[in-house]
Amino acid sequence: MTEKIALIYNPSAGGGKAQRRQGRVEACLEAKGIRYDLFVTESEAHLVETAEIVAQRYPVILGAGGDTTLNIIATQILRNGKKNVLGIISLGSVNDLAREIGVHRLEKAANAIKHHITREFDVGVVRDPKQSQPYYFLVSASLGLGVEVNRYVDIWMRKHPFFATFRSTTQGTAAMSAIHQAFKNKQVPLELTLECNGDRYTIVTSLLIFGNISSYGGTFRLSPTASPVSGKLDCCIFDFNSLAGVARVSLDIKRQKHLEKNTVKVLQGESFKIHARKPLDFQLDGEIIRLDGEVEIAILPKALTMFTFDCFPGETSPGGKKLTMQRGNRKWGKKTTI
């Protein structure tokens, strides 16, 4: 590749595991002959700032981290109206997006980058008329338990940093605690009105997910029709009102019986509108935001070009600010400031 490449590296991704894998990532990219400038971020605010500047200067950006890291970088690309190509170095706890597009393994991701195998993917957008900027998501937007579990687990991990290193095994226990607390404190269910395809539904739900891909939370396959190249979103409405109900529905999903049992209802469309009596908290690829009770959730077809090694059903394989910068391959340059 001849384009300038930036690698934005989030060492805190995956509960800090990304920091220990940095040497391996750099060695793999070096072995493939991929030259890049390395930006190691120090906080979420620094990640946002770095992504904003890099999006202006580099036609190709590699994001090393999890789904939230990729969401932040993609948001800056889209808000700046750029046409950067985005690559994933998968280092998060879940990595739903990387799994979906076939670049979960480092070797596969590096090969896709080396051979410049790209594809235009859909991006979800959330608009609040009272907000000046839209919000984006690559994986999913959720309400209810999707928010409460994410918030609780993050707080729990910060309070117990030792267990953060075993996040993949401990977050399940923390999630169960979060669900119990959400029902106990009456944070769910939510009552709202949903508009889609000209129809209007009044629903009471503890979990509402708008999915751009077929998986959620690393293990659940919610909708067989969800795809980041379909030009549509799949809205999954969950029917449970207790921790025991969550367990039953989770088992149905793992057995892929949830649709025939009607414990999860799925609507598909290009745009949805939510009407609620009070502001709502949304979880967008791990980020939690609060929006007014009148919100539009829609799909932007082919909005973001990404490196990929995957194919989908019926298809063939697709071919003034300062930053500290250092060359990804250390023998190609010294640390400089731009």
Image (cartoon, grey):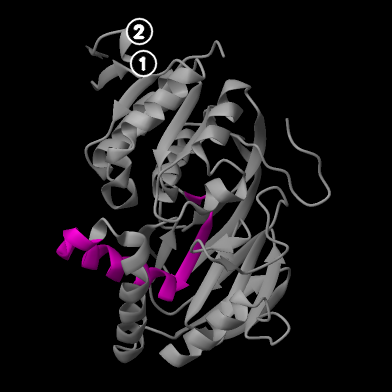
Residue pointed to by mark 1 = 329
Quadrant of the image occupied by residue 297: bottom right
Work out whether residue 95 or residue 337 is closer to the camera in this orientation and state it: 95
Give the number of callouts.
Answer: 2
Numbered badge on residue 85? none
> Residue placed at 49% from the left, 77% from the top?
207
In the picture, measured across the screen, residue 2 lies left or right of residue 168, that is right
In the picture, measured across the screen, residue 129 lies left or right of residue 153, that is right
Above-or-below relation of 157 to 330: below
Work out whether residue 124 or residue 272 is closer to the camera in this orientation and state it: 124
Please provide percent x and percent y for residue 126: 51, 56
Evaluate whether residue 83 shows in this view. Answer: no
Above-or-below relation of 2 to 258: above
Furthest toward the right, the residue is: 314
> Residue placed at 29% from the left, 60% from the top?
166
Q: Which residues are magenta?
A: 136-163
Please provide percent x and percent y for residue 196: 68, 70
Inter-mark Cα distance, 2 to 1: 6 Å
Above-or-below relation of 146 to 260: above
- Tag 2: amino acid: Trp
